[in-house]
Image (cartoon, rainbow, N blue to C red):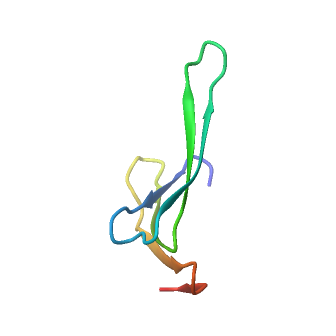
């Protein structure tokens, strides 16, 4: 995959259910400013993944849906 980039889209709204904030961690290095890492937990998620061609155009999108409570694709 040299010269290509992978893009992941995690859709908000109805695609996620039972979302809670699981963790918030402040961070940052000296001189680089402050950062925060936020972890979310949810029972269902919808993701879309695309690769970018070396000329900058996008490949087809691949979608995946998962129900974590049921442990099945949905």
Q: In the current view of this chain or complex, which residue is farthest to the top?
A: 31
Identified at 38% across, 71% down, the residue is 15
Identified at 66% across, 21% down, the residue is 29
Percent from the top left, x then y, of residue 53? 46, 53
Q: How many marks?
A: 0
Q: Is residue 29 left or right of residue 61?
A: right
Q: Quadrant of residue 17?
A: bottom left
Percent from the top left, x then y, of residue 72? 57, 87
Choose between 22 and 34: the one closer to the eye.
22
Choose between 44 and 55: the one closer to the eye.
44
Q: Quadrant of the N terminus?
A: bottom right
Percent from the top left, x then y, of residue 69? 57, 81
Q: In the current view of this chain or complex, which residue is farthest to the right?
A: 29
Q: In the current view of this chain or complex, which residue is farthest to the left?
A: 13
Q: Quadrant of residue 27?
A: top right
Choose between 24 and 5: the one closer to the eye.
24
Q: Is residue 45 above or below residue 70?
A: above
Q: Is residue 49 above or below residue 28?
A: below
């Amino acid at each position: 995959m040299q010269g290509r980039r992978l893009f992941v889209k995690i859709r908000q709204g109805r695609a996620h259910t039972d979302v809670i904030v699981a963790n918030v961690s402040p961070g940052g290095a000296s001189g680089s400013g402050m950062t925060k890492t936020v972890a979310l937990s949810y029972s269902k998620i919808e993701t879309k993944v695309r690769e970018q061609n070396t000329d900058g155009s996008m490949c087809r999108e691949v979608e995946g849906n998962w129900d974590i409570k049921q442990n099945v694709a949905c």
